[in-house]
């Protein structure tokens, strides 16, 4: 397997993955979406809420705020406290804002400096004169298998890269005009794709070719992979964590199968 990064920031990654198979690429995608665990607000104790929103609606909004860090925390089910809540499995955050004011995610004061909102500018609610919001939010670890709020990869997709071949081109250039992306070039008596990353495998070039000289298919060994993070972890962490998860599951299966050997 080979990996070539075209773009890599904390929030976005685009890379070519080659010498692999569709099933493995799809497994990585699914693992990124569902296996990677993050911290999210899971419980809220309201002490005073005189805003226009119900407690439940505010709790839902708070839960959807991406939180950073928390690698060393355990999920409630793994922790030795048996779900009662302790410093190993939960983080307390307090929020106290008096109106008139707009409450932002940055107003959440966390007990752990590592576990904080990934973006401080997320509006939660607008308070008017005399209104107050006073609460304690409890963040816990979880995966998107339990709730979408734990999902760090907000957009993850891949597409096949094209396998483009030409035989006996007569130089009519119909395919050059037919390509909606404008990426087919006629040079030295034949045509080729100038930018294969732009190809959508629409096959309009194949249909435009009267002599049936062009063939375009998806290459089952080369893919363009794209992902975005909500900020709770970097894209490279997302990728490595999801691959580790796949490897762990594969070794669990091997161990299980080994018991039959
Ligand atoms: Zn605990």
Image (cartoon, rainbow, N blue to C red):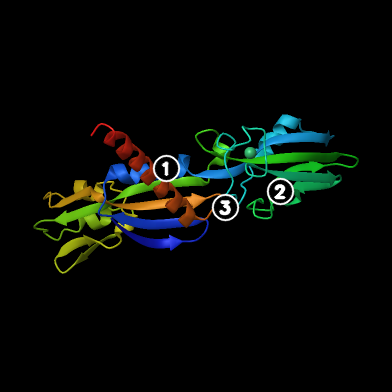
User: Which labelled disc corresponds to residue 149?
Assistant: none
Helix, strand or loop at label 2? It is: helix
Mark 3 is surrounded, within 10 Å at the Cα level, by few (under 14), some (14 to 19) or many (20 or more) other residues, namely many
Helix, strand or loop at label 1? It is: helix
- Asked if one can make out residue 182 in the rendered structure from this viewpoint, the answer is no
Q: Is residue 199 above or below residue 49?
A: below
Residue 39 x, y percent position in the rendering: 60, 44
Q: Residue 113: name its quadrant.
A: bottom right
Residue 61 x, y percent position in the rendering: 67, 38
User: Which labelled disc corresponds to residue 105?
Assistant: 2
In the figure, is residue 128 to the left or right of 18?
A: right
Q: Is residue 55 above or below residue 179?
A: above
Is the C terminus in the top left, top right, bottom left or bottom right quadrant?
top left
Mark 1 is surrounded, within 10 Å at the Cα level, by few (under 14), some (14 to 19) or many (20 or more) other residues, namely many
**Mark 3 to mark 2 CA distance (whole Å):** 13 Å
User: Which labelled disc corresponds to residue 31?
Assistant: 1
Residue drawn at (33%, 46%) of the image: 25
Residue drawn at (71%, 46%) of the image: 123
Q: Which residue is mark 3?
A: 231
Q: Nearer the viewer, mark 3 or mark 1?
A: 1
């Amino acid at each position: 397997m080979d990996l070539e990064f075209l773009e890599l920031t904390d929030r976005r990654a685009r890379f070519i993955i080659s010498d692999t198979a569709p099933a493995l690429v799809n497994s990585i995608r699914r693992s990124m979406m569902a296996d990677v665990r993050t911290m999210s607000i899971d419980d809220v104790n309201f002490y005073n809420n005189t805003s226009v929103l119900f407690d439940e609606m505010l709790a839902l909004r708070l839960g959807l705020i991406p939180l950073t860090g928390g690698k060393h925390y355990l999920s409630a089910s793994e922790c030795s406290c048996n779900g009662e809540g302790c410093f190993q499995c939960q983080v307390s955050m307090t929020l106290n804002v008096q109106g008139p004011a707009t409450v932002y995610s940055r107003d959440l004061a966390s007990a752990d400096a590592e576990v904080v909102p990934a973006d401080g500018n997320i509006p939660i609610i607008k308070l008017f004169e005399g209104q107050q919001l006073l609460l304690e939010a409890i963040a816990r670890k979880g995966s998107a298998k339990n709730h979408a709020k734990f999902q760090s990869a907000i957009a993850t997709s891949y597409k096949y890269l094209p396998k483009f071949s030409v035989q006996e081109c007569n130089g009519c250039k119909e395919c050059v005009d037919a390509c909606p992306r404008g990426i087919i070039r006629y040079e030295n008596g034949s045509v080729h794709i100038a930018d294969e990353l732009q190809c959508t495998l629409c096959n309009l070039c194949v249909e435009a070719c009267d002599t049936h000289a062009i063939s375009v298919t998806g290459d089952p060994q080369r893919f363009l992979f794209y992902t975005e993070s909500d900020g709770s972890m970097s894209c490279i962490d997302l990728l490595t964590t999801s691959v580790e998860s796949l490897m762990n599951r594969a070794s669990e299966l091997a161990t299980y199968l080994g018991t039959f050997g």
